[in-house]
Image (cartoon, grey):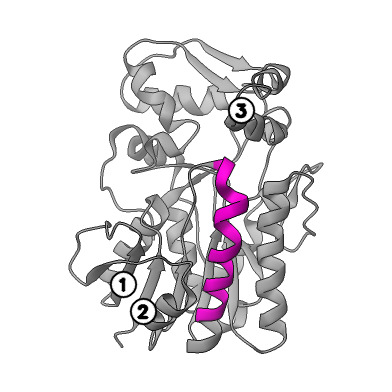
């Protein structure tokens, strides 16, 4: 049965989610400030300010689900951009009955010892992590109060098709293919989970269809962790290219740069992500939702070539 789905954001996650929904026959509305988005049959692009609750409610009326795939690129503006946008999304979901399905990060967990698992408490220490944790806390509270339906999917750093400069590994690929050394944040030899952006989209679509999993946090199926150096080397190998030197920018250097650069100051707060093991366990989600991560070799090919090779079902 055809349903209307509204997606806020047309970055890599929003584009992949729109494609999946359109391919199965849903009517998809993609909302961005510019009106840009994927040019696909069944996808209508709308220029609107999603932080305007009245406008977003009007666009969401009659929709089955409202997907929050927004990701403000400038870390320095999160405190200004996210609160009104998050409240608008909540109001639109509450007024229309559409299920709020949020694509989120692992920031809310904060620094942890051991793998991150579904259901563990949010204990972020930096303001971006506390902000994302607070957004989920508000959504879950309204869900539990019966005011709306909400569910959240979290993924680690993105790889895969169309990620480009939005990903720590993908942004290194063009220079590395040209033979230049890579400079990456923190240590380059510690285990790190990478999430294929298409697997994040598949999980968002899956939880939107499952009332029994709403009110909870789920993890996008992801492959076994690899260090930054290993991940980049294997992506390059998928293109038939040998390894390049990989250097780490230590956390003290980021903090020093933060004295002059607001962006570096923001990155320094998150340096723990790349200075210690950062591992997300998605076994519970894989079992409950019957999803598996795209095979790593395929992820590498998609990352380096931008191919439209479909993700594993």
Disc 1 to disc 2: CB gap under 8 Å? yes
Residue 94 sits above or below residue 219 on the image: below
Residue drawn at x 69%, y 71% is 138
Q: Give whichever of 114, 90 is nearer the camera.
A: 90
- Among the two numbered marks 2 and 3 on one chain, the one whose residue lies closer to the N terminus: 2
The mark closer to the camera, 1 or 2, is 2
Q: Specify whether 222 is left or right of 2.
A: right
Q: CA distance from mark 1 to mark 3?
A: 35 Å
The residue to which callout 1 is attached is: 29
Where residue 59 appears, x then y in whole percent?
Answer: 36, 79
The residue to which callout 2 is attached is: 59
Residue 259 sits above or below residue 141 on the image: above
Residue drawn at x 74%, y 51% is 109
Q: Specify whether 17 is left or right of 143.
A: left
Q: CA distance from mark 2 to mark 3?
A: 37 Å
* Range of residues picked out in magenta: 75-92
Where residue 310 appears, x then y in whole percent?
Answer: 30, 53
The residue to which callout 3 is attached is: 264
Describe the element under mark 1 as helix, strand or loop: strand
- Among the two numbered marks 1 and 3 on one chain, the one whose residue lies closer to the N terminus: 1
Q: CA distance from mark 1 to mark 2?
A: 8 Å
Residue drawn at x 42%, y 84% is 64
Residue 219: tell me if it is visible. no
Instruction: Tell me the chief SS of the magenta region.
Output: helix
């Amino acid at each position: 049965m055809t349903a209307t789905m509204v997606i806020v954001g047309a970055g890599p996650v929003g584009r992949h989610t729109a494609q999946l929904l359109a391919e199965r026959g849903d009517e998809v509305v993609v909302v961005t400030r510019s009106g840009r988005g994927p040019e696909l049959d069944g996808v209508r692009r709308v220029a609107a300010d999603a932080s305007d609750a009245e406008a977003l409610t009007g666009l969401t009326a009659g929709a089955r689900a409202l997907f929050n795939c927004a990701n403000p690129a400038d870390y320095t503006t999160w405190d200004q951009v996210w609160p009104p946008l998050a409240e608008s999304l909540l109001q639109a979901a509450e007024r229309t009955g559409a299920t709020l399905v949020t694509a989120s990060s692992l920031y809310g967990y904060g620094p942890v010892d051991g793998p991150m698992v579904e259901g563990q408490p949010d204990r972020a220490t930096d303001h971006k992590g506390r902000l994302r944790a607070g957004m989920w806390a508000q959504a879950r509270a309204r869900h539990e109060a019966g005011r709306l339906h909400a569910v959240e999917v979290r993924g680690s750093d993105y790889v895969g098709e169309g990620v480009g400069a939005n990903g720590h590994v993908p942004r290194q690929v063009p220079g590395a293919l040209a033979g230049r050394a890579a400079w990456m944040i923190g240590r380059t030899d510690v285990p790190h989970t990478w999430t294929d952006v298409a697997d994040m989209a598949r999980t968002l679509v899956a939880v939107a269809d499952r009332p029994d999993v709403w009110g909870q946090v789920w993890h996008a199926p992801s492959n076994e962790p690899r260090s930054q150096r290993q991940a980049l080397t294997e992506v390059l190998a998928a293109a038939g290219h040998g390894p390049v030197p990989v250097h780490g920018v230590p956390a003290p250097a980021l903090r020093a740069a933060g004295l002059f650069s607001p962006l570096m100051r923001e990155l320094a707060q998150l340096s723990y992500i790349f200075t210690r093991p950062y591992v997300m366990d998605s076994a519970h989600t894989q079992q409950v939702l019957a999803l598996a991560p795209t095979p790593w070799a395929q992820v590498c090919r998609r990352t380096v070539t931008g191919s439209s090779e479909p993700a594993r079902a």
